[in-house]
Image (spheres, coloured by chain):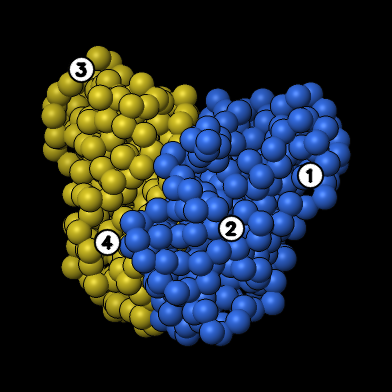
Chain colours: A blue, B yellow
């Protein structure tokens, strides 16, 4: 059956029955609006839009993958504030000819990812569109703590990261060349694995700033540098090049560090911490914050372009 | 200049500089997420998606109109819970060739409408899309009151409405026939005027159920009937057919009551109240809640189809 035959209300029922209630949800789908708990009197909110062909391809990713990824990239934004995701609303634009099962699988993907953090979809809107369009908004709970913003890094702080880098970029390169393996990298492109718990851990541990790495390490750390007014020094020898990434780079005669420094979509978390306090579990040091022009230095070289690494390499002697 | 030349970060700056801070906003745009006050420990949330060609036409509505309408239909959902809108996030998909001024005007439209209720855009996402796509999520504050849902209507209650009906449908009919006037009706299609303050008034006055009329009086009151398990009796002689609507219907040889009963997009509020309490300012009685099958009766006749009125008329002797 296609979406046009099932109709809007059938679709809404199909989607909403997939979401079990949680303690955060006071009123779920089915009314003009939902009601969600905000226990400490504040709510964290972030939104993202994904469009078929630009943010995902149906021939590269299953509907379940797309649902997980759409949820994950939003949940990661909440984690990057040091907050705990609680609830999501989803706007969905779909062609009338789309198979209903695709929407069911998408919803299951959302449910799977949300369950990892105890969040739930509480509302949404379904409209017809030429291309599949997914608009996700997620709420989070700071549990009484201050939000960890991008503005608090100070000279002398340590820069640290949790999660992985370069995996999704390697997977995208593999798919782009027509391959489907190594599976572990292709899967990393399809479904990121943000280190959700590391966000709250960083906040509890006194992180002075934090960001979700969605565009690439260099360009996102530059946001921290500019917002905090500091110079961020990253040391490439402290960055982990995981074995699958190194092997794929060797096979493609590519530089794995390019993927690690500029590859997006892995949703690692980068945070800054006071130098004397050590790091919370899951974080490794990758550099330090110094006085100086707001920007990113890699191995002592300024990286100017927002994409960064290739340009930076070209400037090297 | 077009959107492609200005780029994502230029666009974000263009949009966000249009929104003055409000007391509800603890952290505005520019970080991984925003932080909004939720003073009573709960937050109301609703979302809608609008797509060019389906929900608005650029040759019929200015960018400013589209911004106001996109905001209004979401703010009305919050009002329909008896809550006060506080903050919005907006996902925006735009073609690279779109003039930057269109986005600026859209943002001004959002700002204009949000100022009516003291709400503010606190975050968003801008991506490329073939058709202009606007995903709005709005938060609201219940100010310590219970949410007014669709489920609480009881036999014996009065059905009442605030706002206007039939105006947007008349305006749409006028535009659809190639006319641009009467301006007051065309404007009603372009920019609804939801009775925002009536939502909170209804809640304070003890409304037992409430809904925003977005699809049409009959189909939306049916949602109240089904959710509450009651029979909703509407009396057409209690419905106001405003002069501009009556005059346009006469000019088109149409039945103005069809517009009033089935026309969408005016975002009136319909609520039920205990019979003995009277009605808050701005509400007029349009019917009563009785025991019986969950559904809508107009002048004692069951209205079966969700569109409703034409079908109902056809059934009349």
Asked if both marks, 4 and 3, belong to the same chain, the answer given is: yes
Q: Could you tell me which secondary element the residue under label 4 belongs to?
A: loop
- For marks 4 and 3, give the CA distance: 34 Å
Picture quadrant where residue B55 is located: top left
- Assess whether mark 3 and mark 4 are in contact (beta carbons under 8 angstroms): no
Say if A72 sits above or below A133 in the image.
below
Q: Which residue is mark 4?
A: B119
Between residues A23 and A64, which one lies in front from this camera angle? Answer: A64
- Assess whether mark 3 and mark 1 are in contact (beta carbons under 8 angstroms): no
- For marks 1 and 3, give the CA distance: 65 Å
| Mark 2 or 4, closer to the camera | 2
Q: Which residue is mark 1?
A: A246
Say if B178 sits above or below A313 in the image.
above
Tag shown at residue B295: none
Q: Could you tell me which secondary element the residue under label 3 belongs to?
A: loop
Residue depicted at x 72% and y 27%: A176
- For marks 3 and 2, give the CA distance: 66 Å
Q: Is residue B281 left or right of residue A305?
A: left
- For marks 1 and 4, give the CA distance: 49 Å
User: Looking at the picture, how far across and down is residue A128, in whole percent?
Assistant: 54, 32
Q: Which residue is mark 2?
A: A235
- For marks 2 and 4, give the CA distance: 44 Å
Task: Work out whether residue A46 can be spotted.
Answer: no
Asked if both marks, 2 and 1, belong to the same chain, the answer given is: yes
Q: Which residue is mark 3?
A: B179
Q: Is residue A37 left or right of residue B178?
A: right
Q: Chain of mark 3?
A: B
| Mark 1 or 3, closer to the camera | 1
| Mark 1 or 4, closer to the camera | 1
| Mark 2 or 1, closer to the camera | 2
- For marks 2 and 1, give the CA distance: 18 Å
The residue most toward the front is A317
């Amino acid at each position: 059956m296609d979406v046009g035959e099932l109709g809007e209300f059938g679709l809404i029922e199909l989607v909403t029955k997939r979401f079990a209630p949680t303690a955060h949800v006071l009123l779920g789908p089915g009314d003009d609006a939902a009601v969600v708990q905000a226990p400490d009197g504040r709510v964290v909110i972030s939104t993202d839009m994904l469009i078929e062909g630009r943010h995902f391809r149906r021939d590269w990713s299953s509907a379940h993958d797309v649902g997980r990824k759409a949820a994950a990239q939003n949940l990661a934004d909440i984690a990057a504030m040091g907050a705990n995701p609680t609830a999501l609303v989803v706007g969905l634009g779909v062609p009338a000819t789309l198979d209903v099962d695709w929407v069911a699988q998408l919803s299951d993907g959302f449910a799977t990812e949300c369950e990892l953090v105890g969040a739930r979809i509480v509302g949404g809107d379904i409209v017809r569109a030429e291309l599949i369009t997914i608009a996700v908004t997620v709420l989070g709970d700071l549990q009484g703590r201050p939000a960890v913003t991008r503005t608090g890094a100070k000279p002398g702080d340590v820069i640290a990261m949790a999660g992985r880098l370069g995996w999704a970029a390697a997977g995208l390169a593999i798919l782009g060349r027509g391959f489907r393996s190594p599976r572990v990298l292709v899967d990393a492109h399809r479904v990121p694995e943000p280190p959700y718990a590391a966000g709250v851990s960083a906040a509890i541990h006194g992180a002075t700033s934090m960001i979700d790495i969605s565009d690439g390490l260099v360009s996102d750390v530059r946001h921290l540098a500019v917002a905090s007014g500091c110079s961020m020094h990253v040391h490439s020898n402290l960055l982990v090049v995981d074995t699958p990434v190194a092997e794929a780079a060797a096979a493609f005669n590519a530089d794995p560090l390019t993927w690690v420094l500029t590859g997006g979509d892995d949703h690692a978390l980068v945070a800054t911490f006071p130098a004397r306090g050590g790091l919370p579990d899951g974080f490794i040091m990758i550099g330090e914050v110094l006085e100086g022009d707001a920007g990113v230095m890699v191995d002592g070289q300024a990286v100017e372009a927002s994409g960064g690494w290739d340009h930076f390499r070209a400037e090297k002697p």
